[in-house]
Amino acid sequence: MKMLIGGQKTDSSDGRTIDVINPANGKFLDTIPMATEEDVQRAVDNAKKGQKEWTAIPLMEREKIIQRFVRLLEEHKKEIIAVCTRECGKHVGTTIFEYNQTASVFTGYMESAKRLDGQLLVPGSEPGHDGRTASDMIMVTHEPLGTVVAIVPFNAPMLLYSYKVAPALAAGNAVIVKPPTDNPLTDIMITELLLEAGVPGNALQIVTGSGSKVGDWLVKNPGVDAVSMTGSTQVGIGIAEIMAKRLAPCTLELGGNDAFIVMPDTDIDKAAASACGARKGNSGQICISSKRFIVHNSVIEEFTEKLVKLVREIEVGYDDNVEEMVEKCLGNTDRTNTKGEFIGSLISERAAKEVEAQVAHTISQGAKLLCGGQRTGAFYMPTVLAGVTKDMDVAKDLEIFGPVWPVIGFDTVEEAIEIANGSRYGLSGCVMTDDWKLGMRVAREVQTGGMVVNDSSVYRNQMQPFGGQKMSGMGNEGLTTLEEMTKIKNIVLKGFLG
């Protein structure tokens, strides 16, 4: 596949390419261009023109363009799901879940744009610099930021593309997309459909290549007015430092080590089932999946036994007959396929090896392996670790991005909160308890951007402002946060009401 620069399918200016491989079976899928800095600069230059073209289109017409895009998305549904499944190595049902949210993110942000109407301040409510404001009209308006770079992660390329591109376009910005290097094909397809629907080719572009080079060139380019990025905390810190030097905004959704707290009064069967589901989705490659299972010592044996039983039942695999599986899985609400396989591979063998090393490190610190712990290529078997103590790395800042359940014991509510807050991360979390007052107390005291009482941390409603605290990021995404893609301007009509 090609990049899309200025509305044209484009190779790299030096002809270099990167292979895209199905991580589940190692099969070659396609190539993408490895962009040069010259390619990046051309996209940035185009975006300055594209932003003016896009904002010149009335909002009602822009909404019609997005509606056409949604229809095209539906027409190409099976093809998109198949491509995403192959390049991610994930289960078809997981891809369908992601696809089903994509269209509503775009339409939801367009609805928000129609309500982003600014303010008219009450005249004469304060004296002002000259002591007379009663006849002045003061309008507070929203303007586009300009050129927004959207850096999309590998774990949910379709959905997280939407959470970045949709608000940026809805607010009138031009967008340059940097898709994930391992699995960029779905994002290129979606971009092509948006252009076909009528988004100007200069207003939406996609530039491919390694994040360390292409992403860095984009972020450092002075023509870029804002960055929206989901990825690692290390990369996010680097972006924040670069953007700070020119006082440009960035929205960063970064790492997490979300706590799953189990109180002794809860239904342990329900808690174990929720804990299992909290980690197996997308083979554990979800930012807000629960990653530290903090369980009261009076029920930890029972919880762990039931959790292990459920985890052992998880089937791992990949079916090469993707189109056939798409047909079978569409409308199948439990998202299993005919062979019972529920989770696929990790995004790469490199990623699976990292999980393998992290588990080995945790065992070397004293944890006990109860099940799993085996890697085959990019696949990693669902793994439960017992005997994890709060001083181990995995109980604090070691984020394992794979299907691993570390179980940590506690004796008091205060200790559970201490363990939960003992991480530098603060993305999401949850607590299981029959005592709603206790649940509210824990939810308020755990330092995260979100807390769920009586279900897992994997909860993201499109309306909620979604973001993290501490080293898990800055800024928010969600249909109620469109103003983050705008800048405020005050327009004063002096004496207009006189």
Image (spheres, grey):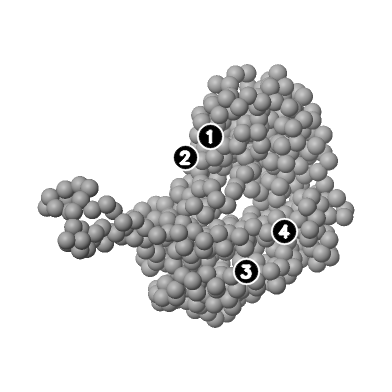
Q: Could you give the CA–CA distance between mark 1 and mark 3, rounded to whole angstroms?
A: 40 Å
Q: Residues within 10 Å of mark 4 (few under 14, many from 20)?
A: many
Read off the residue under disc 4.
96
- Image quadrant for the C terminus? bottom left
- Circles 2 and 1, Cβ within 8 Å, touching? The answer is yes
* C-alpha span from label 2 to label 4: 32 Å
Of the image marks 2 and 4, the number of the one nearer the N terminus: 4
Which of marks 4 and 1 precedes in the sequence?
Answer: 4
Name the kind of residue labelled 1 in the image: Ser
Considering the numbered disc 2 on the image, is that residue within a helix, a strand or a loop?
strand
> Pointers 2 and 4 in contact (CB under 8 A)?
no
Picture quadrant of residue 96: bottom right
Apparent side of residue 482 relative to residue 129 in the rendered image (left or right): right
Mark 4: amino acid: Ile
- Camera-nearest residue between 131 and 482: 131
Q: Which amino acid, by three-letter code, is at mark 2?
A: Lys
Q: Disc 1 designates what residue?
A: 423
The quarter holding residue 428 reads top right
Coordinates of residue 87 in the picture (x, y in percent): 70, 63
Q: Which numbered disc covers residue 164?
A: none
Placement of 15 over or under 399, stated as above or below: below
Circles 2 and 3: CB atoms closer than 8 Å: no
**Which residue is the extreme one toward the right?**
339
User: Could you tell whether 494 is left or right of 306 in the image?
Assistant: left
Dot 3 falls on a residue whose secondary structure is helix
